[in-house]
Amino acid sequence: GETATHESNALQRLVDALRMTNAIDELEQIVPKYREAARAQSRNSGRVFGPMELKGMYLSAQLHEARERPHESEREVRALLHLLRENPKTVHDFSGECQTIMERASQGLFVLTSESGNADLIQAWAGELAKLRR
């Protein structure tokens, strides 16, 4: 419980620092650990997922794009969207955090931009984001 929380908080700070310096190689090693810690924290709290897990999925999508793997990035975005749709109560409990992550992804992921993204995915993403803004 408490150890998982401390570990995920430490990983959160490390991930943020690595993102600011665009340290892709290092992030690629840390993000799986971050996602593991986020899952453990959610399970210890008795939740299906938490905001850190969504952020981990978003980070993974960013990494895939940085490594020019758009299909893998799209897969992460679809998985995140599925998680949101399947767990409305959890989304409601963390609506502010979910909205922030989704807005960042809308602006920061190529797979969610009209020039290069999948139109159906972009529309589905916009629909979920609109629900959160209500």
Image (cartoon, helix red, strand yellow):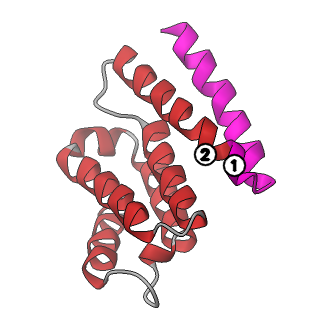
At a point 29% along the width and 64% down the height, the residue shown is 128
Which residue is tagged 2?
28
Q: Residue furthest right?
A: 21
Q: Position of 40 compared to 109: left or right? A: left
Where is residue 45 shown, x and y percent of the image?
38, 18
Q: Height in image: 3 above or below 25? A: above
Q: Height in image: 102 above or below 51? A: below
Q: Height in image: 5 above or below 119? A: above
Q: Which residues are magenta?
A: 1-26
Tell me if I can see residue 87 in this picture.
Answer: yes
Q: Residue furthest left?
A: 86
Q: Quadrant of the C terminus?
A: bottom left
At a point 34% along the width and 20% down the height, the residue shown is 43
Q: Position of 36 compared to 77: left or right? A: right
At a point 46% along the width and 28% down the height, the residue shown is 36
Query: Is residue 18 in the magenta section?
Result: yes
Q: Amino acid at mark 2?
A: Glu
Mark 2 vs 1: CB contact within 8 A: yes
Instruction: State which quadrant residue 124 falls in.
Output: bottom left
Which residue is tagged 1?
25
Q: Amino acid at mark 1?
A: Asp
SS for dot 1: helix
